[in-house]
Image: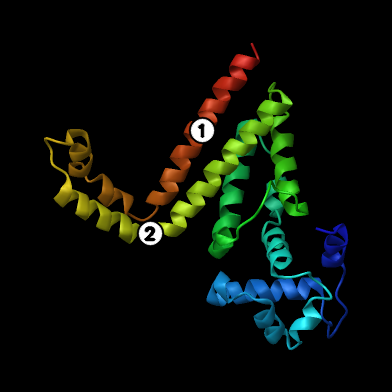
Amino acid sequence: MDESVWERLDRPEKEPKPGLSVRRIVRAAIELADADGLAAVSMARVAERLGFTTMSLYRHVRGKDELLVLVLDTLAEPPATLWEPFDGWRAGMERWCREHLAVLLRHPWALQIQTAGPPTTPNQLAWMDHALRVLEETPLSPGDRMSVLLLCTGFVVSQARFSIEVSAESEQAYGAVLDELVDGERHPALRRVVDAGTFDLAGAAGAQGYDFTFGLARLLDGVERLVERVGR
């Protein structure tokens, strides 16, 4: 993508009645998706929302693919709290993961956007750089720091998808189905989990937050062991 697109995105809008701009186009696309889902976003619908012709949008963005990249970058703007001081690399990475999850869950439809290649947009690079700065407090090599970043990113994205796709109600319904299907002789370990009411607890309020906290703690436990071993 042409670097000038990012420059145009950062360009201040004229007041009081701004004309068509990259920022207004992106904002309109986000509003459409928030209201009607990602499928509602098209160059024609965005133009209609803004009161312009479809062709006029192409003077600012090359097409829908570029627009969606701009949308993703806008939604990925790091919150101010991400830059607050932290006490050690582990606390810093825990905050990074929690803030990342919050950003993803704010606009769930954004996870449906298909992207090609690694992160390259300004805000995506800012998230990467922040995590790597945190991990510079460890004795890990640059390559290992990058691997930890990728591991944490994968965990957060998978947890976000799970939270969006699997509701508390569906987890409870799954537990009821398993209660009928699972034979204690054929699947004894699974039967014991079902009998313990695990899926009832999974559907309880805050259970998905517990799953994220549990998984993140175990992930960082593993990284901490690696840090200790490398630092010997």
Q: Which quadrant of the structure image shows residue 1?
A: bottom right
Residue 65, image x, y percentages: 69, 65
Compute the Cα span from label 2 to label 1: 24 Å
Image disc number at residue 167: 2
Disc 1 secondary structure class: helix
Q: Which quadrant of the structure image shows residue 46?
A: bottom right
Q: How many marks?
A: 2
Residue found at x 17% / y 44%: 182
51 vs 172: above or below: below
Q: Of 151 and 208, which appears nearest the observer?
A: 151
Residue 20 can be seen in this image: yes
Q: Amino acid at mark 1?
A: Leu
Looking at this view, name the residue that lies furthest to the left.
185
76 vs 57: above or below: above
Closer to the chain start, of discs 2 and 1, is 2
Residue found at x 46% / y 38%: 215
Q: Amino acid at mark 2?
A: Ser
> Crowding near pointer 2: few (<14 within 10 Å), some, many (20+)?
some
Disc 2 secondary structure class: loop
Residue 168, image x, y percentages: 35, 58
Image disc number at residue 139: none
Left or right of 162 on screen, residue 101: right
Image disc number at residue 219: 1
Residue 94 can be seen in this image: no
Left or right of 39 on screen, residue 130: right
Q: How is the image coloured?
A: rainbow
Residue 227, image x, y percentages: 61, 21
- Circles 2 and 1, Cβ within 8 Å, touching? The answer is no
Residue found at x 69% / y 86%: 48
Q: Quadrant of the C terminus?
A: top right
